[in-house]
């Protein structure tokens, strides 16, 4: 999945770079960046929900250990930071 996503992003960037009109190239790049930002917000919300779900009956240190981050980072994720 990650490799496919990376390949798709690279292909989109190459396609945008090939646009000869600079204004059109700018707008296409802007559109793709907006889509990436939207996807990033969605993925961040998923991570936040996971941290909140894992907290039930666990310390933040335990949640952090499960996620491979510190306890304070797990707590920050749960708070959307």
Image (cartoon, rainbow, N blue to C red):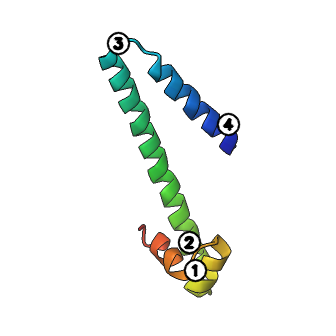
> Could you say which quadrant of the image residue 7 lies in?
top right
**Rendered residue at 67%/75% (across/down):** 66
Q: Position of residue 43 (x, y in %)?
A: 52, 54
Q: Do tag 1 and tag 3 residues touch (Cβ < 8 Å)?
A: no
**Rendered residue at 42%/45% (across/down):** 37
Give the residue at mark 3. Answer: 21
Circle 4 sits in a helix, a strand or a loop, which is it? helix
> Could you say which quadrant of the image residue 22 lies in?
top left
Quote the CA–CA distance across marks 1 and 4: 32 Å
Q: Position of residue 16 (x, y in %)?
A: 46, 22
Circle 1 sits in a helix, a strand or a loop, which is it? helix
Who comes first in sequence, dot 2 or dot 3?
3
Circle 3 sits in a helix, a strand or a loop, which is it? loop
Give the residue at mark 2. Answer: 51
**Rendered residue at 53%/74% (across/down):** 52
Circle 2 sits in a helix, a strand or a loop, which is it? helix
Q: Do tag 4 and tag 2 residues touch (Cβ < 8 Å)?
A: no
Q: Nearer the viewer, residue 59 or 68?
A: 68
Who comes first in sequence, dot 4 or dot 3?
4
Answer with left or right where residue 51 lies relative to residue 20.
right
Q: Nearer the viewer, residue 16 or 78?
A: 16
Which mark is nearer the camera, 2 or 3? 3
Location of the C terminus (image quadrant): bottom left
Q: Nearer the viewer, residue 33 or 52?
A: 33
């Amino acid at each position: 999945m990650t490799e496919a996503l990376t390949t798709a992003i690279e292909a989109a960037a190459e396609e945008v770079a090939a646009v000869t009109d600079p204004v059109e190239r700018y707008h296409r790049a802007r559109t793709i960046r907006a889509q990436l930002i939207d996807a990033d917000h969605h993925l961040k919300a998923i991570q936040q929900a996971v941290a909140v779900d894992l907290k039930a009956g666990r310390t933040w240190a335990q949640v952090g250990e499960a996620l491979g981050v510190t306890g304070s980072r797990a707590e920050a994720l749960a708070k959307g930071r």
